Amino acid sequence: MKPLEPAPFPRPAGVREAAAIQRALRDRVILEGELSVVRYLAALDASHPTRFSKVQGASVAAAVLWDRQEGRVLEVATASVPEAELFPYIPGFLSFREAPSYLAALGRLSRRPEMLLVDGMGIAHPRAFGIASHLGVHLDLPSVGVGKTLLYGRPEAELPRAAGSAVRLLGREGPVGWLLRSREGVQPLVVSPGHRVSLEGALEFVRSLLGKTRLPEPLRQAHVHAGEARRTLGG
């Protein structure tokens, strides 16, 4: 299978234009699709400089190509984008900051993934168009967002402490995702469909990837490799 050749990502002049882009594209999101047959996925995470970093000028993204059938990493690609080229960090507009480096990393993988697993939100977002949705629509690939903290929505009920427990997240117009307890007693993850997957399908897909840590294993690997690449730059 040929590698991805991503089109350039939009660079808005400011927050108002960024919000307009999100609103214009969110109607393209498809909340249907079957992921059970997916074998090759790309897990995406990014590492940013801290105030203690030796190199303040770049954000580093990692794309991990994961073989779901064999449960292992096949390939890792990383890419960095200088700070001067990045959209500012503003909650709710993460895609404009991180997507360019994700697309660069994805373009370095030797094969096209069948879907994207993204550190961030899908439709569990104030404008129903988080980074997982934006990347999914941009690349026309199924996508699922997995967030570490809640950005938008309220849990339908109290989440049990048992591993694998989940409750729906409700937005203004209905369900937008799930709180998922990936390990007993740990803080829950936020799982939301990004594009070309149903609400239930997103949850079951992430459950199928859980291992011995809080994060789904492909995302944990992406987190590790992004951090290693960041440290190589001196961050």
Image: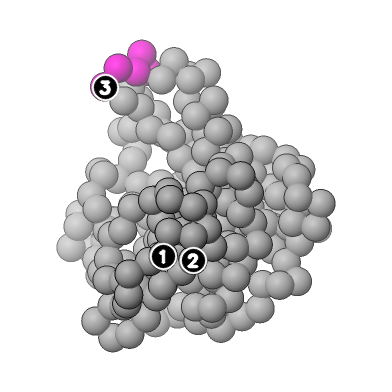
Give how far apart the Cα atoms at labels 2 and 3 are.
Answer: 37 Å
Residue 42 visible? The answer is yes
Q: Quadrant of the C terminus?
A: top left
- The residue to which callout 1 is attached is 160
Q: Secondary structure at mark 1?
A: loop
Q: Find residue 64 and report its horizontal and vertical position in percent.
A: 64, 44
Which amino acid type corresponds to the residue marked 1 in the rendered image? Pro
Callouts 3 and 1 close, C-beta under 8 Å: no
Q: Give the vertical position of 34 relative to 20 (above or below).
A: below
Image quadrant in which you'd find residue 224: top right
Q: CA distance from mark 2 to mark 1?
A: 6 Å
Task: Say whether residue 209 is magenta.
Answer: no
Would you call the spot at circle 1 few (<14 residues within 10 Å), some (14-19), or many (20 or more)?
A: some
Which residue is pictured at 41% across the width and 72% down the height?
A: 167
Closer-to-camera residue (45/192): 192
- Residue found at x 34% / y 18%: 53
Q: Is residue 130 left or right of residue 164?
A: left
Observer-nearest residue: 202 or 76? 202
Percent x, y of residue 145: 47, 61
Range drawn in magenta:
51-55
In the rendering, at what x and y percent does residue 216 appear?
57, 51
Marks 2/1 in contact by CB < 8 Å: the verdict is yes
Question: Residue placed at 26% from the left, 22% from the top?
Answer: 51
Q: Can the viewer see residue 194?
A: no
**Residue 165: mark in rendering:** 2
Badge 2, how many Cα within 10 Å: few under 14, some, many 20+? some
* Alpha carbon distance from label 3 to label 1: 37 Å
| Three-letter amino acid code of the residue under disc 2 | Ser
Report which quarter residue 204 is drawn in: bottom right
